[in-house]
Image (cartoon, helix red, strand yellow):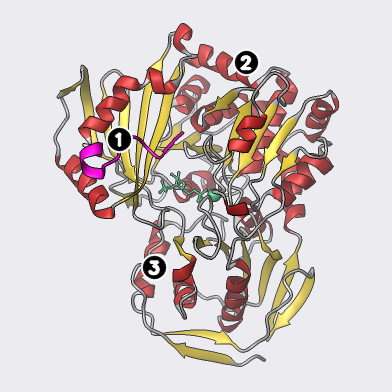
Amino acid sequence: MALVKTVATTPFAGQKPGTSGLRKKVAVFVQPHYLENFVQSVFDSIGDTTGKTLALGGDGRYFNRTAIQIILRMAAAAGFSRVMVGRGGILSTPAASCVIRKYKTFGGIILSASHNPGGPNEDFGIKYNIPAGGPAPEAITEAIYARSLAIDSYRTVESEDIDLDRLGIVRIGEMEVEVFDPVVDYADLMETLVDFDAIRALFASGFRMRFDAMNAVTGPYAHEILERRLGAAVGTVMNGIPLEDFGGGHPDPNLVHAHDLVAALAGPDAPDFGAASDGDGDRNMILGRDFYVTPSDSLAVLAANAPLCPGYKRGLAGIARSMPTSAAADRVAAKLGIPCFETPTGWKFFGTLLDSGKATLCGEESFGTGSDHVREKDGLWAVLMWLNVLACRRESVADIVTAHWREFGRNVYSRHDYEGIESAAAEGLMDRLRGLSLAGTVLDGRTVAVFDDFAYTDPVDGSVSTKQGIRVLFSDGARIVYRLSGTGTQGATLRVYIERYEDDPTRHALDPQVALADLITTARTLAEIEARTGRTEPTVIT
Ligand code: VG1
Ligand code: CO
């Protein structure tokens, strides 16, 4: 029996989980006791941990391995009887959710700062997922935060580091640590949802794709599933080896950061299909040859075509999307006669809808799509769903999306991010907006029908979340939404979401920046963006 040590500590300010866990610079996490305080606060907030099993893994970024060893010792001291760790300490976020559900663990700890850069000078992150497999709901994250403000000691054991690269079972005191291959369970789950035979036949017919793993966690999963199980050409997966600093890039699958993939998909000789995923494998970007699918449209297209995929052939119970996500999915839901739920930003808000069977597919405009197969968004799953649809329809990505717009109309959409602005300026901008009273006024020719700060009452458990984004809803269906990011680690990021419905097919091909130009001007003027932040243009447009 390893000796349990109690270590005296004092609270750190600011251990408050954001949109998806606690994210800070590595320099913050490596301070003595910082990680330990947070982990102990988690263990103290989730009930009796004695004799339970924990899933543990991360996106492989710098400090991942060290953090895993620290958490293993603390789990032993907390009385867990078993911890399941992905080989090398690596688990994609959706694979962690899969493992928690499949082996019915007492939740899991996921180490990730997702799409944020990694390395000694960059970001690290940690979150707890509940036994259902999803991110802890706000009631738990608030309890963790409250505990972190009162903590005066944590418990650990004396023991050597374990070898994270050797599969099998070792012990820390009485606790078993099982190092397992994280790819197999996940790939097996995918085989139950999408038609691997149909996709194999698609690749055999000469269909070509590129998958950009962005030097992040999905490389090994993509190699196994796309190249080995589905027969895609060797070399389909690019940047497929996980690196601690993601090769120095932002592992964020959008047109700016996945530029190599975007370049590879341009021109007449380009592959038929392109996709990328983020640092922890829960995001996806979908591209056709010379064609970009916005995440909001991707959700709508997958919802409309889901019955082509074996796991969804009985249809969908409902669709859920985060509030800033475009209403394209709502139109599909209306046509199918199923409900569409509008939740605050962050996957944790989909959990109750998925658990209760009210929603089958979920999505966010931030390159997140998923279903009730796990309780996280799932990048490779979305790619496989698209491949299944392409295999059945044998049309190009561009043709599928433009046909979708002809049928449903197009929700022309764009998100403008102003990254790294001064926190005080960002708060001031939001506070001023909140103080306005705009309902009934006319802005640049459009009448404001609703002006509010989005609040959400969970239809399953009744919990209420307020201040989830300022909405300007116009009477013609157009809208502007303002939010501050809850995942950044430096200054503040202002996100402005702009949307307008277009039912005229002759205007569907217009560049969204052109089609939305007047609303974009309204959005900038209304929020006094230039005067308050000094920025004339956003940092990233998606
Ligand atoms: C962003 C996105 C949000 C997403 C979150 C986590 O949050 O906007 O939709 O759920 O990242 O994604 P924010 O608060 O910065 O806007 V990731 O792939 O962590 O895991
Ligand atoms: Co992510």
| Circle nearer the viewer, 1 or 2 | 1
- Name which of mark 1 and mark 2 comes first in the sequence: 2
- Front: mark 3 or 1: 1
Residue contact at pointers 1 and 2, CB within 8 angstroms: no
Mark 3 — residue?
A: 15
Q: Position of residue 381 (x, y in %)?
A: 65, 40
In the rendered structure, which amino acid carries the disc numbered 2? Asp
For numbered disc 3, what is the local secondary structure? loop
Q: Is residue 506 above or below residue 336?
A: above
Percent across and percent down for residue 423 are: 28, 54
How many other residues sit within 10 Å of disc 3, few (<14), some (14-19) or many (≥20)?
Answer: many
- The x and y percentages for residue 512 are 43, 22
**Mark 3 or 2 closer to N-term?**
3
Residues rendered magenta in the picture: 529-542
Q: Is residue 147 above or below residue 420?
A: below
Question: Earlier along the polypeptide chain: callout 3 or callout 1?
Answer: 3
Where on the picture, by quarter, is residue 105?
bottom right
Tag 3: residue type?
Gln
Q: Is residue 492 left or right of residue 361?
A: left
Q: Residue at 41% across / 58% down in the picture?
A: 489
Mark 1–mark 2 Cα distance, whole angstroms, equals 36 Å
**Element on which disc 2 rests:** helix
Residue that label 1 marks: 536
Q: How far apart in space, not on screen, are marks 3 and 1 (Cα)?
A: 33 Å
Q: Is residue 294 above or below residue 2?
A: above
Query: How would you rate the neighbour count of disc 2 (Cα within 10 Å): few for under 14, some for 14-19, many for 20 or more?
Result: few
Relative to 78, is 526 above or below? above
Could you tell whether 90 is left or right of 468 in the image? right
Q: Which mark is residue 399?
A: 2
Quick one: 282 or 301, which is closer to the camera?
282
At a point 71% along the width and 30% down the height, the residue shown is 387
Q: Residue at x 37, y 83 (%)?
A: 10
